[in-house]
Image: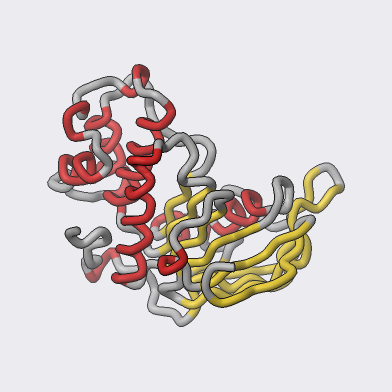
Amino acid sequence: MASTFPAYAASDAPPVVGLAVDLQGVTRVFDGVPAIASITLAIPVGEVVLLRGHNGSGKSTLLRVIATALSPTYGAGCVLGLDLQRDRAGIRAHTDLLGHQTRLYADLTAVENLRFTCGIHGLPTARVGECLERVGLGEVGGVRVASFSQGMRQRLALARCLLRSPAVVLLDEPYAGLDADARHIVDDLLAGARLHGTTVLLASHEPPPAGLVSATAHLENGRLVGMTRGLS
């Protein structure tokens, strides 16, 4: 396949650092109960890390903290050398979170959604059609998202991620809603990430092929209980 994550322009490139994610004792509390507790995690640039754990183990919360959608209650951390508390805008410029909400505009067409993303992030629109083709939506680019199935919306959200080419990709159950024929879209994204040095953290009950994962982080009851190489 063609390059999934094209090279950055020099002005758009993220800071050059050894660690993509560096967390020190990060805790996030909701209503007095920690969703994640005392997590210390170091992920080098270019790693594809699978987060494993039962529902409620803290996977989604951890991804949202890294994406700056949530602030740590305690602890500190950096993403691409940028501080989670002080450099939120900088982190968001170089990360993309695909969570349970696809964050699409239902009244816009697929093409318009991606062009809107280009406008927000100062990207050229030349790759919009290409990204829609890669996720199998090339023929429905002019259709409003309101009529899309959940699987089609998931594909469009993945197309948005491909379009942005972020330095850090955060995927929360990326296979959800995709039929068997569409799983390759996520797998191709992961393969492209490994090829081009993009860092990926994904939480999934459906693990990707073993060769696409460089490390596995195991969470239990909000705590990181182990880190192993490869898929485990």
Residue at 46% over, 72% down: 47
Query: Vertically, is 23 above or below 59?
Result: below
Residue at 46% over, 34% down: 177
Q: Is residue 70 left or right of residue 220?
A: left
| Residue 7 location, quadrant | bottom left
Q: Nearer the viewer, residue 174 or 95?
A: 174
Q: Outermost residue toward the right?
A: 32
Residue at 33% over, 48% down: 185
Query: Vertically, is 85 above or below 124?
Result: below
Q: Is residue 171 left or right of residue 110?
A: right
Q: Quadrant of the N terminus?
A: bottom left
Residue at 25% over, 66% down: 8
| Residue 153 location, quadrant | top left
Q: Outermost residue toward the front?
A: 180
Q: Can you give x and y, in whole percent of width and height, for residue 94 in the image?
A: 40, 60
Q: Can you give x and y, in whole percent of width and height, for residue 232 in the image?
A: 59, 68
Q: Can you give x and y, in whole percent of width and height, for residue 65 in the image?
A: 61, 55
Q: How many marks?
A: 0
Q: Is residue 33 left or right of residue 209?
A: right
Q: Outermost residue toward the bottom?
A: 18
Query: Vertically, is 153 above or below 44?
Result: above
